[in-house]
Image: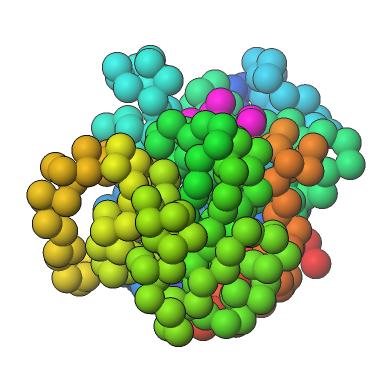
């Protein structure tokens, strides 16, 4: 099989390899579709403590089961499945209480568990027993099913801010996650959704999601416009679906009293500290939280949301490449020439 192997930070090599061998408790998946995530780019260039080269990255994936071990009962040959990233250890208090994305061990596909930038992938026992391995309904394409992984993270992000009927939501950043959150916020009861974006190209793609208001951050005062759109009260929920310090500061500045801010987008390690007057939080009685990853329950929900059309992911898929074109695919993603870049390993 062909695989893209991270030999060391900055060195991604296409290599012919033997198919992984499975035991009685594992399975072999033919990878049909895998998307490039921003975290894959960070691992490629800077490494990660949980990734030991040589390693295979890739965690937003879908495929078909080629072979199962004798004692595997969850799957059978021919099953179409989507994978999530975060894999609970199943033993710690976080995992036992359904919060596996906060597991201290923090197993993940494409990290400690060999990932999907390959034609065939081994699904080990822990992934099959504890992880997000979700059947794909008939009629749902592999490309769309693969994007249940980032959508599950979006579900986690909106659940954590107690999203409910009638709220006004601001999304600071309209990349793939921000676009999905427009549909998701509406599905969870949002009365008004405001999207904020710097890049004009991404703004045009995001318009397919028909947010109630679009704000170009380089041309308008974001906080002032969001206050104007909420009658001066501020939005009930603000999600930073981008990775800038300024977005974190704007979110807390604009949020309504008793509102919620989710610092969803992580920041680069060399980012400056955010300047946030604590008295703003104090007097607003607002809630500031973060979120990362998801749990298997949320991945199953994400697959259902995509299949039923409640959340559309097709508009954010802008490019597809064969596995042999993975270097160009990373370049397109990192240059922001597209949104979601899909790899089809068998093309």
Whether residue 301 appears in this view of the structure is yes
Say above or below: 346 vs 13.
above
Residue depicted at 38% across the width and 56% down the height:
232
Residue depicted at 73% across the width and 41% down the height:
310
Which x, y percent locates residue 120?
68, 50
For the residue pair 61 and 217, the one nearer the viewer reads as 217
For the residue pair 170 and 325, the one nearer the viewer reads as 170
Instruction: State how the image is colored.
Output: rainbow
Which x, y percent locates residue 187?
65, 38
Whether residue 144 sits left or right of residue 333 in the image: it is: right
Magenta segment: does it hold 298?
Answer: yes
Q: Quadrant of the N terminus?
A: bottom right
Residue depicted at 14% across the width and 64% down the height:
275
Whether residue 124 sits left or right of residue 270 in the image: it is: right
Say above or below: 75 vs 226.
above
Where does the magenta region start and end? 295-301
Which x, y percent locates residue 250?
30, 63
Magenta segment: does it hold 238?
Answer: no
Q: Quadrant of the C terminus?
A: bottom right
For the residue pair 74 and 100, the one nearer the viewer reads as 100
Residue sticking out furthest to the front: 231
Whether residue 47 sits left or right of residue 58 in the image: it is: left
Say above or below: 87 vs 180.
above
Residue depicted at 64% across the width and 31% down the height:
301
For the residue pair 316 and 43, the one nearer the viewer reads as 316
Which x, y percent locates residue 327?
57, 78
Whether residue 334 appears in this view of the structure is no
Q: Which image quarter: residue 236? A: top left
* SS assignment for the magenta stretch, majority: helix
């Amino acid at each position: 099989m062909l695989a893209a192997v991270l030999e060391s930070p900055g060195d991604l090599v296409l290599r012919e390899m033997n198919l992984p061998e499975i035991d009685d408790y594992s399975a072999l998946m033919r990878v049909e579709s895998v998307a490039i995530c921003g975290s894959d780019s960070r691992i490629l260039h800077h490494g990660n403590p949980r990734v030991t080269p040589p390693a295979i990255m890739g965690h937003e994936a879908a495929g078909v089961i080629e072979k199962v071990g004798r004692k595997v009962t969850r799957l059978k040959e021919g099953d179409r499945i989507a994978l999530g990233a975060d894999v609970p250890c199943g033993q710690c208090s976080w995992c036992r209480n359904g919060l596996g994305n906060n597991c201290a061990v923090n197993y993940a596909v494409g990290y400690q568990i060999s990932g999907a930038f390959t034609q065939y992938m081994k699904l080990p026992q822990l992934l099959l027993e504890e992880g997000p391995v979700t059947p794909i309904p008939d009629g749902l394409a592999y490309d769309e099913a693969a994007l249940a992984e980032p959508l599950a993270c979006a579900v986690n992000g909106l659940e954590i801010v107690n999203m409910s009927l009638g709220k006004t939501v601001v999304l600071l950043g309209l990349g793939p996650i921000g676009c999905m959150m427009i549909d998701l916020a509406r599905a969870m009861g949002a009365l008004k959704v405001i999207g904020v974006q710097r890049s004009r190209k991404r703004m045009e793609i995001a318009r397919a999601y028909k947010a109630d208001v679009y704000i170009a951050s380089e041309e308008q005062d974001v906080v002032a416009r969001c206050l104007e759109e909420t009658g001066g009260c501020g939005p009930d929920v603000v999600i930073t679906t981008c990775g800038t310090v300024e977005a974190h500061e704007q979110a807390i500045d604009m949020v309504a009293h008793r509102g919620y801010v989710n610092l969803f987008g992580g920041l680069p390690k060399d980012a400056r500290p955010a300047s946030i007057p604590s008295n703003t939080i104090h007097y607003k009685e607002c809630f500031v939280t973060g979120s990362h990853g998801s749990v298997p329950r949320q991945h199953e929900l994400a697959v259902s949301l995509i299949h039923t059309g409640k959340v559309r992911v097709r508009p954010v898929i802008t490019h597809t490449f064969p596995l042999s074109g993975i270097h160009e695919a990373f370049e397109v993603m990192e240059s922001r020439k597209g949104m979601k870049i899909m790899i089809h390993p068998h093309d």
